[in-house]
Image (tube, grey):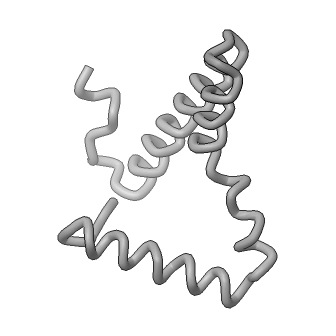
């Protein structure tokens, strides 16, 4: 759920959050890229040249992210529509 009214506010909020993490937990900040699965698997897909295994890993990561987002939004607001309700 995004509460910011504009993209600029969202970016400002995210940057402020990242600065806070960097100050409070420098090692956690340094290794936080590990949690960014979709960008990492996108890079892998590009470097691997679109091999079948890279596509499968990317698809699994994308579906996992979508599933987690759906579960998270349902847990926060059980009445909220999820990404599968529009299908």
User: Along the horizontal axis of the image, is 72 left or right of 19?
Assistant: left
Which of 7 and 76 lies nearest the eye of the viewer?
7
Quadrant location of the C terminus in the rendered image: top left
Which of 41 and 2 lies nearest the eye of the viewer?
41
Which of 48 and 6 lies nearest the eye of the viewer?
48
Does 82 sit above or below residue 48? below
User: Along the horizontal axis of the image, is 79 left or right of 75?
Assistant: left
Q: Where residue 39 sits: x, y (%)? A: 58, 44
Does 46 sit above or below residue 72? above
Residue under the point 76% across and 72% down: 28
Q: Where residue 41 sits: x, y (%)? A: 64, 35
Quadrant location of the N terminus in the rendered image: bottom left
Task: Give the number of marks.
Answer: 0
Does 57 sit above or below residue 26? above
User: Along the horizontal axis of the image, is 84 left or right of 32?
Assistant: left
Q: Where residue 50 sits: x, y (%)? A: 62, 16
């Amino acid at each position: 759920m995004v509460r910011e009214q504009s993209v600029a506010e969202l970016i400002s909020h995210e940057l402020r959050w990242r600065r806070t993490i960097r100050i409070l937990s420098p090692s956690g900040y340094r290794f936080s890229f590990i949690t960014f699965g979709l960008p990492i698997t996108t890079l892998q897909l590009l470097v691997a040249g679109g091999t079948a295994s890279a596509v499968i890993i990317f698809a699994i990561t994308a579906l996992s992210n979508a599933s987690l987002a759906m579960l998270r939004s349902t847990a926060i607001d059980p009445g909220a529509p999820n990404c599968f309700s529009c299908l």
